[in-house]
Every structure is written in structure tokens, then in C-alpha cells.
Amino acid sequence: MTVSTSTLPRTDTDLAYQRCINPRCGVTLPVDRAVFSCPDCGDLLDVIYDWDRLPVPSRLSDFEAKWSRRLDPLCFSGVWRFHDLMPFVPPEKVVTIGEGQTLLRPSTKAAQYVGVNEGNLLLQYEGMNPSGSFKDNGMTAAFSHANMVGARRVACASTGNTSASLAVFCSATDFGFKAIIFIGSGKIAYGKLAQALDHGALTIQIVGDFDDALARVREVADRLGIYLMNSVNPFRLEGQKAVMLRVLEALGWEVPDWIVVPGGNLGNSSAFGKAFQELHYLGLIDRIPRLAVINAAGAQTLDQLVRSRGLLWNSGLPDESISKAYYDHLDLEHIRASTIASAIEINRPVNLKKCLRALDVCDGVVRQVSDQEIMDAKARVGAGGLGCEPASAASVAGAKRLREEGIIAPSDRVVCILTGHQLKDPNATVAYHSADREEFDRVLGSRGVKRAGFANRPVVVPNELDAIIRTIGLYSDAPPTA
Ligand code: F0G
């Protein structure tokens, strides 16, 4: 009988392998298997490295040498210039589209809004990625793994950004990847739907929400042997570690006090925790920043489980009866996730356990913020010059909350992750700033948003030169010019 090498357990010579996160199981698998849950117990898988036998730079600043070799796509990529810290794939199998050319920028307006000292509120702008969100960091890693194992049909369920990124990677590369995406009906912002369609993905709109779509795509991927690109795929999270590496890089390798990130399926928070745990283990950082994960109030599973019901990582054995009771309660009461921050409109976060680990590693906290707080924070972020979508602004709204509670100090250096670009969801932005009450009520009022305290309303004027000049005089501070 011949046995495919991809079904053999890992050997002791493997420098990278997969391992079940459940310490009672701990099954290990070779890195070239694509199963996405533990074949023995069904739990999440981690990518593990034998760091003692891998070449790792002795200082993070050694990575700066890559900047002078930017013509090499692996040095240009904001993910793969850190290949040494995610060495699961040989360089010749890497699939990159130039992801990770992002900015970390202080925002005075956001600092004032949050209440920290000027210069201490920094925005990590992941909207600059080719598909307009942080997803490209994880997608380049998962596509590289797919390429390594020879997969060509790739699928995901999505609230919009994962699918946009998947569609971009399939269409921008010449490996013959075919994109299949599952979205909930009426649940996806138009900018994201436009991307899936424009980039040629097979787009399957199911009657249901994201939680339904994810359950279905997992079954379909299993049945048809399609490669799954959701963040249950541990290789996605390896790529997302790079967001934190670029934050450190932009700070001259200094560790900030806080990382604040929106929480949906909890892939980012999980990846960030793993990044810091590994960097600390490797002696590349001397302390770990605190992590704040921010739910939208209409999709508050993490906040409910951690703060109201006391769920803890507990050395890898969280009390699963707590989460089960909560999910049973959601089912019994027919509670579905509902928030203007459609990207994080998720009630069953698949990476819950890994996020609990990240909270443990990073002395983390969890909060939930209302759609009102999200939209107000978003307007202040926009006024400061970086446009983000509603889910991203949950980070800034959450930082404000934590500052008001005295958990974040004014002197703390706080990095908020702006996960997705403003143009992903123009409807929410225009409704907030609009002078049209009906539009406001339809898009935002229905979500409990009552005010637009930071609105920049368009001014309606007759089509007459004098009236236009009078209006400009009325609304602008600049002296009229001759
Ligand atoms: N922000 C944005 C803009 C997102 O698109 C997502 C997730 C998140 C935050 C939450 O990140 O899942 O790592 O906690 N979007 C997924 C999608 C679910 O399908 O595009 P997370």
C-alpha cells in the first residue's frame, strides 16, 4: 500500500509542523497537510517551529537589511521580509502580491478624542493593502501554503474582506487559483461585494449570515477537498503576525504599551498574541504590550464570555461548558449578530480559544462598544486623515472607553489597528455625514445610532455663482480672495 507523505505524522526532523492547541490532545501533523482542524479531537491547529534549529536574526533591526533589496518580491513584501519568523514555506513557493506596504501614523485628532497625550495615539493603517484590508497579510501566507500543497480551488466564507482579498489573490497571480466565496445575503458592504465580483470570484450568496456561511463552507471544503482560506487555517494567522512586526518596525523596534484591535472571528488578536509570545521567547523583545480586543455591542460573544461569564485560557483548557451555554442561549433566543460594523458581525468566533491564549499572554482586556461609539470614532479618525470602515473604528472607540475607565493612561503609547479602508463601506460614512434624515435613519437609526455629533454635512446651494460664493464665505474661515 502506498501512503501519501501528506498523511504521515510529522517526523522529528521537521523544522515546522502543526500541532493541536488542546494540551490533552497535542497531535502533531506535518506542515504540508491541509486539514484545518485536529483530525483527532477537532480543535484548532497551530503552526509550531523548532526555533533552536532555525536561523533567526539576533536583533529585530537585522530585518532592516531587507529594505535595500526591495526589488526582490520577498524583501518588498511587508509580510515576507519577516520570513525568518514564519518559516513554514520555502521561498520558491511563496505567493505574494506586494502586500503589507502600510503606515503607522500618529493622529492628533484621534489622540484628543481618546484622551491620550498628543503623539501617543498611533493608527496602523491596514487599508493600504492591495485589497484594502489587513486580510492580505494572512492571505499571502495561506496562498503560499496552498501552493506548497498543490491546491488550486480555494474557498472562504466572509463578511466581505476575506472574500475580497481571496478574489484579488486569485486574479492577481498566475498560478491558476480559482476563488469560491460564501457570503450571507444582504450582509456585505458594497465596496467588498464589488471587489469579489470585479475580480472574478464565484460568489455564492446564501440565505443566512456569516456564522451560517462559515459552517457551510467548512462542510463544502471538506466534502469537495477545496482549500479553506478562513482564519481557522493556521497559516493565515502566521501571515497576520506581520502586522505586529511592522508596528514594531515603525516604532524603531520599541514595544508600545497597548495594541487595540477590533474582534470578529478573532484571527488578528490570536495572531498578534502568537507573534508577541514567539518574539519574547526568542529574546527579540523584552516585554509584551497589552492587548485590547473590542467587540461591537451587537456581536459581543467575546465580551460576554470573558467579562460576564469568566471564560479563561486556563493553560489551554478553557471551560467549554461556558461557551456552549452561551451559544445555546443565542440559539434559544434566536439572537443573531447585528451591527453597522458588518465586518465583525459574528457571534461564533472560530478563533475564540486562540484569542483567550492571546489575552493570557498579553495581559489583555476585552470591551464592547455601541454602533454610536463606532460611528463617532470613525468620524474622528477620518477627520485626522485616515479613512477606515466602521469595524476598524471599534479599536479607537474601545481605546476611548479604556482611557475613560483609567485602564489606559494618558501617557501610554497606544496603537489602534485600522483593519479596513473607508471606501469598503461608503454607505455607512455617507449616512453619518448626510443632511438627509431619512438616509441617516435607514442606515444608522435602525442600529440605534441617534446622533452624528462629528458630522461634516454637505451644504446644498442653488446653482448660482453669488449664492455659492456667499456659502463659501459663510462656512469657510479663509478670507475671500479678489
Ligand atoms: N476588521 C475588519 C475590517 C474585518 O474585515 C474583520 C474580519 C475584522 C476586523 C475582524 O477580524 O476576524 O481577525 O477578529 N473580517 C472577516 C471577513 C470576518 O470575512 O472579512 P478578526
Image: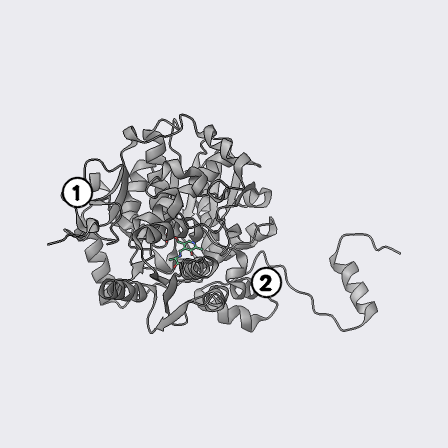
Residue 27: percent from the left, percent from the top? Answer: 16, 44
Q: Give ligand 1's quarter of the image.
A: bottom left
- Label 1 SS: loop
Residue 480 sits above or below residue 206 on the image:
above
Q: Quadrant of the C terminus?
A: bottom right
Instruction: Please tell me which of labels 1 and 2 falls first in the chain.
Output: 1
Q: Are marks 1 and 2 in contact (CB under 8 Å)?
A: no
Q: Which mark is residue 433?
A: 2
- Residue in the foreground of this view, choosing between 154 and 187: 154
- Residue in the foreground of this view, choosing between 403 and 312: 312
In which quarter of the view is residue 105 placed?
Answer: top right
What is the three-letter code of the residue carrying label 1?
Answer: Gly
Say if residue 406 shows up in the picture.
no
Render colour scheme: one colour
Whether the residue under disc 2 has CB within 8 Å of ligand 1 = no
User: Total of numbered circles in the picture?
Assistant: 2
- Residue in the foreground of this view, choosing between 212 and 372: 212
Q: Residue at x 53, y 66 (%)?
A: 427
Q: Which mark is residue 26?
A: 1
Q: Quadrant of the N terminus?
A: bottom left
Q: Residue at x 17, y 47 (%)?
A: 8
Residue 80: percent from the left, percent from the top? Answer: 43, 42
Q: Nearer the viewer, mark 1 or mark 2?
A: 1
- How crowded pointer 1 is (Cα within 10 Å; few <14, some 14-19, many 20+) is rated as some
What is the three-letter code of the residue carrying label 2?
Answer: His
